[in-house]
Every structure is written in structure tokens, then in C-alpha cells.
Amino acid sequence: MAMAMAGTATFSISSATSIFRTSSSLKFSSKPMLIPMRIYALTSNDIKVGTNLEVDGAPWRILEFLHVKPGKGAAFVRTKMRNYITGNTVEKTFRAGSTIEEANVFKESKQFTYKDGSQFVFMDLNTFEESRLNEADVGDKTKWLKEGMDCNLLFWNGKIIDFELPITVQLTVVDVDPGLKGDTASGGSKPATVDTGAVVNVPLFVNIGDEILVDTRTGQYMSRA
């Protein structure tokens, strides 16, 4: 009988032939194999602007972050974050590489349909299910909100915790001082009231009835629509 040797282990060629002969008779299932996915824990090294964390049982959003490596001592991540529930902003540091819990915050697209008393009503256009936010929840975002506008509602633990406006909105100028003159080439501006009630600084050539585009993040005029 021929034998193959590697180190102290021996292997029988005849045994190998038997093994291969046996394996040829194996039957394989046609059903797909389910491979479990490994979920990796989030660490402070993964922090970036917009990361959602759960700290002390509440959801927070990272507004700013900075990885710090001091000459002495352990590295850390300095952050500024906002509490979705209270709106409070705090500064917090995390030890570099420490495990942190990611908040399960997800978005759903809803259309603002109408205002019912002090509540703002948003509708899912697929299911026609309504979601309501109070004036306190909407805050100063109401100055850019128009009926028929598509927004993102943010959910955490089955509750609405925030909503996002479109970055750019189209608004109509309803009031502006037509008598204000100036050198339009020099980039002068004047205050204009739009149909949501907000006041926007616009170029001197903008008049009542003009449609303009506004950045909701800054409240600044972008261009005529």
C-alpha cells in the first residue's frame, strides 16, 4: 500500500480514493443556504457629522467632531451633539476606540398636507396614513413650510423625533419695498416677505410676485426660480 508522509502525519492514498468515491454520491439541497450576517459594533472611531447615537437612553445627532491625539494620555474624540427629543446641544468626549451605541433612527418621506389647529398634518402618499406634529415640534421650520411640500420625518422607537425640510424651497415674494433703489451691479439687497411669512434678503431687482429659491438651512436667497 502506497503511503504519503508530511511531518509525523500519514495519509493513505487508497483511503483518499474511498473518500472521493463516497463524496460523489452526496446529494445537495436546491434550497438556498442562509448565511448569518455579522453585525459590527460601532466605535468612537466611526463618529462623523450626522451619526446618530443613543446616550443615556436618548437619541443624539453628531453636529461636530474632532479626533484628538494628545502628546500624553489616551486619544479621544471630542463631539458636539444635539438631543433629538429636547433640542439641547452639549459637548461630549469619547475615548478613542470605545464601543458606542448607534440610535436606530430612520426616515420616512411624508407630504405636509394641511394645518389642523396647532397641529401640522403630514401624509404618507402610499398608505394615506397621517402623522401629526405640534407647533413646538416644528419650531422655526414653519417659516419655510408650505402645503404639498415633501419632507422627511425621523422616527426612533416608534415615535417622531424630528423632521427635515427640503434643502431648497420655492417661495413667492408677497411684499417688498418697490421704492428702494440702488446699484444692482454692486450686489445690494433688500428685505422681502414670502408667502410663508418669512423675511428673506433678496437682490434689489426682485419684485412682488417673483418666485425665488431659498436655502432652508441658512435662510438665504439662492436665485429666482
Image (cartoon, grey):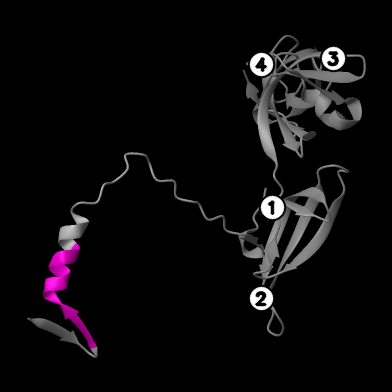
Compared with 199, 175 (above or below) is above
| Residue 190 visible in the picture | no
Residue that badge 1 annotates: 102
Q: Quote the CA–CA distance across marks 1 and 3.
A: 34 Å
- Mark 1 lies on a secondary structure that is loop
Type of amino acid at the residue the image marks with label 2: Lys
Q: Position of residue 69 (x, y in %)?
A: 66, 76
Badge number at residue 69: 2
Mark 2 and mark 4 residues within 8 Å of each other at the beta carbon = no
Does the magenta segment cover residue 106? no
Q: Earlier in the sequence, mark 2 or mark 4?
A: 2
- Seen from the viewer's position, the closer of residues 27 and 7 is 27
Mark 2 or mark 3, which is nearer to you? 3
| Residue 36 visible in the picture | yes
- Mark 4 lies on a secondary structure that is loop
Q: Residues within 10 Å of mark 3 (few under 14, many from 20)?
A: some
Q: Residues within 10 Å of mark 2 (few under 14, many from 20)?
A: few
Residue that badge 4 annotates: 127
Which residue is farthest top? 209
Mark 1 or mark 2, which is nearer to you? 1
Q: Quote the CA–CA distance across marks 1 and 4.
A: 29 Å
Compared with 85, 57 (above or below) is below
Question: Residue at position x 29%, y 46% from top?
Answer: 28
Q: Total of numbered circles in the picture?
A: 4
Q: Quote the CA–CA distance across marks 3 and 4.
A: 19 Å
Mark 2 and mark 3 residues within 8 Å of each other at the beta carbon = no
